[in-house]
Amino acid sequence: MTQQITHSELDAAVKKSPRKWVYLFSEGNATMRELLGGKGAGVAEMTNAGLPVPPGFTITTEACNAYYDAGKHFPEGMWDQALAALKIVEQQTGKHFGQKDNPLLVSVRSGAKFSMPGMMDTVLNLGINDETVQGLVALTGDERFAYDAYRRFIQMFSKIVLDTDPKDFEHVLDQYKERAGVKSDAEISAADLKKLVVEFKQIAERQSGEPFPTDVYQQLQKAIEAVFSSWNNKRAIDYRNFNKISHSLGTAVNVQSMVFGNMGEDSGTGVAFTRDPGTGEKQLYGEYLLNAQGEDVVAGIRTPSKISRLQDDLPHVYQQFQEIAHRLEQHYRDMQDLEFTVEKGRLYMLQTRSGKRSAQAGIKVLVDMVNEGLISEQEAVKRADTTQVYQLLLPRFDEAKKKQAEKEGRLLAKGLNASPGAATGKAVFDADRAEELGKAGTPVVLIRPETSPDDVHGMLVAKGILTARGGATSHAAVVARGLGLPCVAGCEGIRVNEAEHLFRVVDSDFVLREGDDISIDGATGEVFAGIIETVDPDFEKEVELKQLLNWADQYRRLGVWANADYPRDARRAVTFGAQGIGLCRTEHMFMEQERLPIVQKMILAKTQQERQAALDQLLPFQREDFKGIFVEVTRLETQGGHEQELKEKREMLEAVGSMREMNPMLGLRGCRLGLLFPEINVMQTRAILEAARELAREGKKLQPKIMIPLVGHVNELKEVRRQLEAVAKEITAEGVAVDYKFGTMIELPRAALTAGEISPVADFFSFGTNDLTQTTFGFSRDDAEGKFLLKYVDGLTEPGIEGKVKILPVNPFQTLDRDGVGQLVRMAAENGRKANAHLELGICGEHGGDPDSIEFFHMVGLDYVSCSPFRVPVARLAAAQAALTTSERDK
Ligand code: PEP
Ligand code: MG
């Protein structure tokens, strides 16, 4: 367009208003997402980059919010600004809104800051009426096209703006097709379309109780209102709740001159990603339809063609589109999701936004972009999504198959997503049976009311765990995460009947029995009847992920260690890049099948001799376990890893009837047990040091770290230290001296408060944030989530109060409560170090694998985090992100 476009009218309208509500595409840019929405900012950026974008303007998200504030009235000056902007669009296109010759038609689309695909409303072909349709006929010489646009407009406007039932229109459309003996909409004749337009208007009038608006300005005004209103439709609200998008952002409205993809075989419309969003492969990925408008692609009436075929259909357009796609990717330095329309051989870009992608694609795209020189390694590390990294390593369900199962009514219940991943197998209701079947090669899902250490042997062979009770740090959840097993915990929608080996679904009369197939999704908490197919990843083959994590390792300060109770956990941790073992729960070692009876004998022993006899039997088992773990640790060292840590900890008492306590979590556990029965500590220390000594003889140098759990008073630690040093002396006297370190878990508020007294007795502290959270809040880590805690997070419904009352922002067992528990950690770290400058500081609670908590541990200056093996890659990445972003913030 050579004509001089003046903005003076728009400027004048803005001057008269309290605020600028309307921006021409040429006035915006990519940084204005908050104000213009993602779509508005995207088209503005493309316009200014000189790409072919049909002219238009954006009404701001502020206008939307002001509209609501004013009781659903346009804010002062907004409409005048919109009219002035429309005039400019008329000049830019040479077309005229509402006029018979050369009429301008527009689309009116929503566009919020964060994309909410399909959640809000859009009206196309607006500006058409009995008069302008004539202009359209004259202009295009295509009566069929013009009336098709008209009937589409009535249909869409009625549905979106007048809120009529779309089925009535579809029904009439079907009747016309049937009468004419044709199958597709595209085959309906111009004469029939004309009749349809009349009939459609009558339907609209009948349903809405008012004449269909012929005034194009009225059409525009109502469409803008409808888009504003769609911000608060149920779909949109649910979507925002699910994705944690704020309800106060508002949507922008984009008014854009129409281009037509339905003007013949040299026209079309489509959507494409600049890279494959499933695999990340660098190739255009998408589809298009010739001679169609946008909604036809989505509606699935005709099957669209793969984007690569456009090369044959419209070679020039394809080449131009490829160039633009490349340019946009270079410009945004990210994979883009594009919408385009071709009108009579001319390409127009309608949208660009960052494309949503699978976990696999997410990582591959970042690594490829570094290799292409598009982004730096640091940026790739910062942008990588920790959730996607985690997902990549877990078996996953085929999404389509899951949807199918849901459709078939096989979704039984939903519990807590305690440990992600997909598991399928035969339902089994006790650990022994699970072990028997599992060892024989049958895939099983272990279902329990809740698990206890007695169930571990069954859990070890199960593909997944389902419990009806228990939270994110319940036994089932912690052990499952450690093993990388999918787990749905606290599934209150089922009632487990152990005696009958079945569960009933609370909301239906469905019964699932032992041996029935079941599938659980630990990432979503869903429980399905029957088998759903899964896909299994292999870390060694995840070349891009390994590359990304190697980059991350250069930037992080925190060490990343693993919690591993069995040699196989340690092996996995090494594969995932752990630098040491930060927690080995020795009581979990007790739980292997052949040891359990001996352990029970030990605990129930009436005399010291009896106990000693049982302990003597256990010693070789534990020594072998430690050896197994140490072997992995020495492998770490030869691979250049950091130091390793070993420790021992709390007791398993749940299995011991005669010692049952009202509050076992506050009872005879942790260091208390070893203080009352010193032989247990002696045996375990022996097992650790003898294992180290045997390996030392093989030339493998180790420094085990012995960690004492649940210390609340320095005297407890002093006494345990005395016991251990006595054993160490004996071992030294037997020949080889073993170098070891001695430390404690800080997991009780009293220990944190008196850290300055405790640290001179310890070489290291490791924060046990599971118990520290439990005891600081006074929330039972086994029961709170199922009973009330998740409701605290989700929000409570209170009579007389609209919406939900949120008590806690997040589950404190998953993400560290910085203001409470975090302050104890910070204080203990500071005071501990003050009293012992060499004190090493780590964390081994479940928070060690949570990105938000890792950032906090970085900030308070801990030396390392220790987490379950499957979270090691996540922790490596999160630690690097913490280092990169917090140092940026400090600048
Ligand atoms: C803790 O309490 O954070 C911890 C690591 O110990 P456990 O989970 O074994 O009680
Ligand atoms: Mg603990």
Image (cartoon, helix red, strand yellow):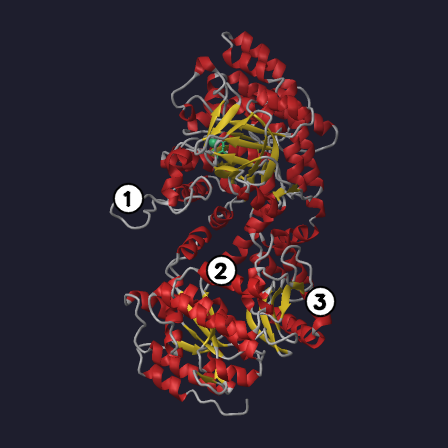
Residue 382 percent location from the top left of the image? 56, 58
Secondary structure type for disc 1: loop
- Which quadrant of the figure has residue 188? bottom right
Residue with the mark numbered 2: 171
Return the disc, 2 or 3, that comes first in the chain's sequence. 2
**Disc 1, disc 2: CB below 8 Å?**
no
Front of the two marks 1 and 2: 2
- Residue at the location (55% across, 89% down)? 1
- Residue at the location (60% across, 69% down)? 187
User: Is the CB–ligand 1 distance for label 3 below 8 Å?
Assistant: no
Among all residues in the image, which is located at the extreme left?
A: 800
Front of the two marks 2 and 3: 2
Instruction: Give the Cα distance between marks 3 and 1.
Output: 57 Å
Tell me: 142 left or right of 537: left
Among all residues in the image, which is located at the extreme bottom?
A: 3
Amino acid type at image mark 3: Arg
Residue with the mark numbered 3: 309
Residue 529 percent location from the top left of the image? 56, 34
- Residue at the location (36% across, 34% down)? 778
In the depicted view, which residue is nearer to us: 105 or 811?
105
Q: Is residue 280 above or below residue 816?
A: below
Q: Which mark is residue 798?
A: 1
Instruction: Give the Cα distance between marks 1 and 2.
Output: 45 Å
Amino acid type at image mark 1: Glu
Residue 375 percent location from the top left of the image? 62, 65
Among all residues in the image, which is located at the extreme front?
A: 179
User: Is the CB–ligand 1 distance for label 1 below 8 Å?
Assistant: no
Return the disc, 1 or 2, that comes first in the chain's sequence. 2
- Residue at the location (53% across, 61% down)? 174
